[in-house]
Image (cartoon, rainbow, N blue to C red):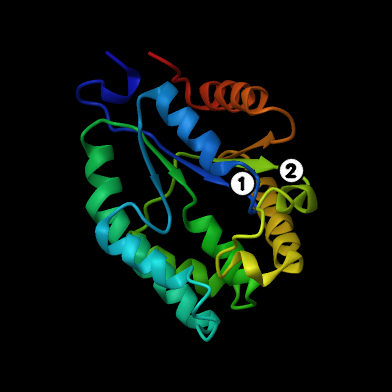
Amino acid sequence: MSSSTTHGTRGRFIAFEGGDGSGKSTQAGLLAETFDATLTREPGGTIVSTKIRELVLDPAHPELTARTEALLMAAARAQHVEELIVPTLESGRDVVSDRYVASSLAYQGVGRGLGVDLIADLNAFATAGLEPDLTVLLDTDPVAARSRLGDDLDRIEEAGADLGLRVVECYRSFAADAPDKWVVVDANGSIGDVASRVHAAVTERLGRGAP
């Protein structure tokens, strides 16, 4: 039996964070497969949350204000937590999420200038205080990471390199301030090399690896 479905044990919640192009989606998927965990993403994960994702990331809506963006992200997260994340964890299964609250703190709180404390309070309400057991920061050069995005950018990615730089520095400060809750992984190199680093780091911190 895998570690993520051990009877009577609450699942572990692992979030991946990093700048656009850092490889979060790929590495989250690989870790979820290795751990036999439920893979999800934000905004998204449920029907309602995915509909909100389509709106908030649509380049056809540049008129969305920073506050609207923050509220939509929190609304998507509230549904995601209550409908998918909490029931899955309570069933004893691990959850791996591509982004979580730290993304809002970085993008809307710092990047959009709304303030980290305000966004933290909003998301504490949205999530009923649910925090990841571990957040994995995929750390890479933001300029190099951005070059991987190509030309098909969503509304937030279109905001430009300056936003990306502020976001990456914000993530690094979060990880430095909470080393017990964050692990920083060098995201440079091949997909396989990064996956090995992620697996080793998560297993060391949580004590749970592949079945």
Q: Which residue appears at 45% of the width and 18% of the height? A: 209
Give the amino acid at mark 1: Ala
x and y percent of residue 146 in the render? 72, 54
The relative height of residue 107 versus residue 88 in the rendered view (above or below) is below
Label 2: element kind: loop
Query: Where does the image place residue 143, in percent across and percent down from the top left?
Result: 79, 53
Q: Is residue 55 left or right of residue 93?
A: right
Question: Where residue 200 sits: x, y (%)?
Answer: 59, 21
Sequence-earlier tag: 2 or 1: 2
Indicate the secondary structure of the residue bearing disc 1: loop
Question: Which of the numbered marks, if any, corresponds to residue 198?
Answer: none
Separation (CA) of disc 2 from disc 1:
19 Å
Residue 185, located in which quarter of the rendered image?
top right
Residue name at image x 44 percent, y 22 percent: 34
Residue 178 locus on image (x, y percent): 61, 46
Name the residue carrying label 1. Answer: 178
Q: Is residue 17 above or below residue 77?
A: above
> Is 211 displayed left or right of 84 in the figure?
right
Q: Which residue does the image show at 26% across and 58% down from the upper left?
A: 47
Which of label 2 and label 1 is nearer to you?
Answer: 2
Quarter of the image with the N terminus is: top left
Mark yes or no: residue 126 visible: no
Q: Going 37% across and 52% down the picture, which residue do you hit?
A: 130
Observer-nearest of 174 and 110: 110
Residue 111's quadrant in the figure?
bottom right
Tell me the residue that label 2 is attached to.
140
For the C terminus, the quadrant is: top left
Depth order, front residue of 5/165:
165
Q: Amino acid at mark 2?
A: Thr
